[in-house]
């Protein structure tokens, strides 16, 4: 990003916050990212150590060379289609801020539906999350419903490490372990919650380039041709009569209702069928 010339006769140059914002927006937009202005504001505010709302008050301020360099590096990463959450190192989720990096998916707003379902369980209910990743869902449930007994698991040791780090940073206690599917000793669960892979190896290239920067094991896994391979496997191993709440792609609703008994599908904030709640057959 080019410096902006200021001053009258001295020939010195400086870069204002407003100019940095405009330049960052242009570079991110030229790369084809969806929300270049919003991304630029998030990155500039982060480097300045202020909220996005504070940018309008500091528009004419002149950041230090170190801050300018940090902004330029962050903008370059975003323009290379690295997810904004990875560049920032965090993502908002419900009432929490979740630390994220390439070990785990960054939590999406639509996934908050799973927390909504869990938060409606009776007092003291036992919940286990499969495929916890960053721990966002389980930790949000613990934060909002401390009476629930929440545990979690993931087949990726790196993801389990990330979830434990988030729990420690947030001051929340989460029993999370490495396991593929349901842990062998799991008993008396009132609800299994899961956001498992549901993107196929073919359709991933029809989506935004950012998703290809996320861990492939968490995006496609062994989804098979219909994208339901991993989800189907968890349903098949879940004891009959246990309740499940599962996120899926927006076209999977009918198939999910066929695989589960007494199933209901919830729509996300964009109107797509996103989470199905039902009973293991």
Image (tube, rainbow, N blue to C red):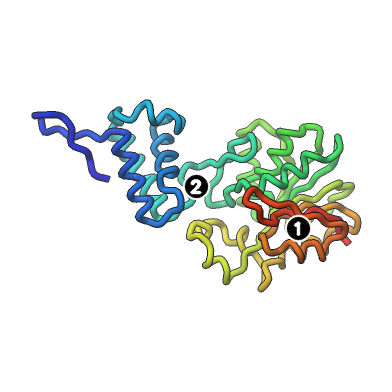
Disc 2 crowd, CA 10 A, few/some/many (<14, 14-19, 20+): many
Q: Is residue 262 visible?
A: yes
Foreground residue among 182 and 73 = 73
In the displayed structure, would residue 5 be above or below residue 257? above
Disc 1 crowd, CA 10 A, few/some/many (<14, 14-19, 20+): many
In the displayed structure, would residue 244 be above or below residue 6? below
How many numbered discs sit on the rendered protein? 2
Foreground mark, 1 or 2?
A: 2
* Residue drawn at the location 76% of the way across and 64% of the way down: 254
Q: Is residue 264 left or right of residue 4?
A: right
Quarter of the view holding residue 96: top right
In the displayed structure, would residue 43 be above or below residue 275? above
Q: Residue furthest bottom?
A: 225
Q: Position of residue 219 (x, y in %)?
A: 61, 60
* Residue drawn at the location 86% of the way across and 46% of the way down: 190
CA separation in Å, label 1 and label 2: 26 Å
Residue beneath label 1, please?
Answer: 181
Q: Is residue 134 left or right of residue 53?
A: right
Query: Which quarter of the rendered picture does the C terminus lie within?
Result: bottom right
Foreground residue among 35 and 152 = 35
Q: Earlier in the sequence, mark 1 or mark 2?
A: 2
Q: Residue furthest front?
A: 271
Residue beneath label 2, please?
Answer: 86
Tag 1's secondary structure? Answer: loop
Q: Position of residue 56 (x, y in %)?
A: 38, 30
Query: Which quarter of the rendered picture does the N terminus lie within?
Result: top left
Q: Position of residue 204 (x, y in %)?
A: 56, 65
Q: Is residue 259 left or right of residue 6?
A: right
């Amino acid at each position: 990003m080019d410096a902006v010339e200021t001053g009258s006769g001295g020939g010195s140059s400086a870069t204002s916050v407003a100019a940095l914002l405009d330049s960052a927006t242009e570079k991110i937009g030229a790369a084809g990212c969806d929300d270049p202005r919003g991304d630029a504001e998030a990155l500039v505010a982060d480097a300045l150590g202020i909220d996005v709302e504070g940018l309008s008050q500091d528009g004419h301020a002149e950041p230090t060379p170190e801050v300018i360099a940090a902004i330029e590096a962050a903008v370059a990463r975003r323009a290379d289609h690295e997810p904004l959450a990875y560049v920032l190192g965090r993502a908002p989720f419900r009432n929490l801020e979740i630390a994220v990096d390439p070990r785990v998916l960054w939590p999406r707003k639509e996934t908050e539906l799973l927390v909504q379902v869990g938060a409606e369980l009776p007092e003291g209910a036992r919940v286990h999350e499969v495929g916890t990743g960053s721990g966002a869902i389980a930790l949000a449930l613990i934060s909002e419903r401390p009476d629930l007994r929440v545990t979690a698991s993931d087949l990726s040791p790196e993801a389990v490490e990330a979830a434990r780090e988030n729990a420690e940073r947030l001051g929340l206690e989460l029993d999370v372990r490495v396991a593929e599917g349901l842990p062998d000793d799991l008993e008396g669960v009132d609800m299994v919650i899961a956001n498992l892979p549901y993107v196929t190896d073919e359709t991933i290239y029809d989506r935004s380039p950012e998703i290809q920067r996320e861990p492939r094991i968490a995006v496609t896994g062994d989804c098979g041709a219909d994208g339901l391979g991993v989800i189907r496997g968890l349903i098949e191993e879940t004891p009959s009569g246990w309740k499940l709440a599962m996120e899926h792609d927006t076209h999977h609703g009918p198939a999910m209702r066929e695989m589960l008994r007494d199933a209901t599908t919830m729509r996300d904030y964009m109107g797509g069928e996103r989470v199905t709640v039902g009973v293991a057959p």
